[in-house]
Amino acid sequence: MVLLDLARIITGVGAAAIATGGTSIISHAYDGKRRAHAFALLGTIVGIGLAAGPTLSGLLVTALGWRGVFGVVAGVAALVLAAAAFRVLPAPSATSTGDAPRRGFLDLSPLRSPRFLAVALVPVAASFAYVSVLTYAPIALSAVHGQDAATAGLFRLPLTLPVLVGPLLTGALITRTRVSPHTIINTAIILLVTGDVLFLLLDPSLSPVLLVIPMILLGFGWGLPLGLVDGEALASVPAHSSAAAAGILNFLRLGSEALAVAVFGAALAAIIGAQLSNPTLGAEVAAGATGHAAVYASVFRMMMIACAVVTTVIGAAVILLRRASGTPTPNSAEDELPTAAESPTDSTPVL
């Protein structure tokens, strides 16, 4: 188990490096609408992994065992590394390296930008509104409607499938229409809040089919700004701070996801235990045990209201920070601020 945990830590470090370096590379390599399209494609790829990853892993475990999953992933990673070795990226320019001011090991300068913070808070809102539901929806369907794991997993598809479509839709809207990134972000936050509120339809006396609508809304609320947020965040800082901005953004995204899931689960179990006057039984019910559907549904609805409130507050903060930054409404790729997207390149790389 210790060896497995160490391997997971190493994998996490690699994943963090890819997430940070990858977005920074895209921001440097493309500009304008081409950069928006590139980040939309990135968001779609992330969505594919989110939607298909658990299902494919389950199939691999059944066919090859749990070790087979790691073997296949390692093989795919090796192929990607080999393919990347034959792709040439443009050399860094003086704008992005030599002329940059010297900073310490940890560059927190992006946090001083209201414009960056406004964008960086969007995935934090999505963590509470969407990731919590994505994590606990199968358990809720089991506890409230008695669904088995397979049925609950299939029932979760309305939460994940819109994540595949959302980034592509965003890319098309930005590149082919005059819809601004801010409009898409505002729409996404509204969808997230509405989806959480409509999850009040979770009740043992109502059909679980009614939950498809809030699931779809939440899926698009998460999927529409996926990729777009990365591009807008890196476009809000000078080129020499793009790597630091990518790191901070991913820290806020992943950290808020972990925090939201942990707080949601702990609060859910604690409140259920208090209502049943039995913490042990409360933990079992919170884990999906049947027999107390009404109690579980009542507490879950309470948590959904809390998530909607948190998301609304964060959404208001996003709007206030954006106004404080004086960011114009058109596509920020055309703003006057010298950004990572404006770094000159000698050739168009293949990502």
Image (tube, rainbow, N blue to C red):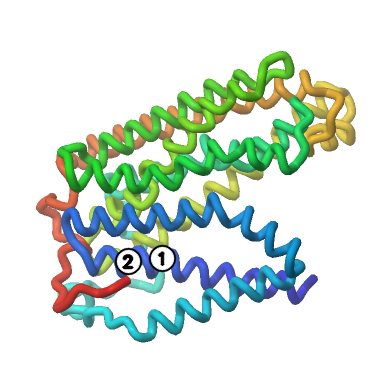
Helix, strand or loop at mark 1:
helix
- x and y percentages locating residue 258 in the rendered image: 59, 50
Is 131 rendered above or below residue 143?
below
Question: Percent x, y for residue 243?
Answer: 34, 67
Q: Is residue 97 left or right of residue 299?
A: left
Q: Nearer the viewer, residue 194 or 342?
A: 194
> Circle 2: is it few (<14), some (14-19), or many (20+) Cα within 10 Å?
many
Q: Is residue 123 visible?
A: yes
Q: Quick one: 310 or 107, which is closer to the camera?
A: 310
Res 132 visible: no
- The quarter of the picture where residue 317 lies is top left
Q: Quadrant of residue 347?
A: bottom left
Give the residue type that dot 2 points to. Ser
Q: Which residue is mark 2?
A: 24
| Tag of residue 20 | 1
- Residue 134 percent across, percent down from the top left: 59, 40
**Residue at x 86%, y 33% (from the top left corner):** 279
Circles 2 and 1: CB atoms closer than 8 Å: yes
- The quadrant of the image that shows the N terminus is bottom right
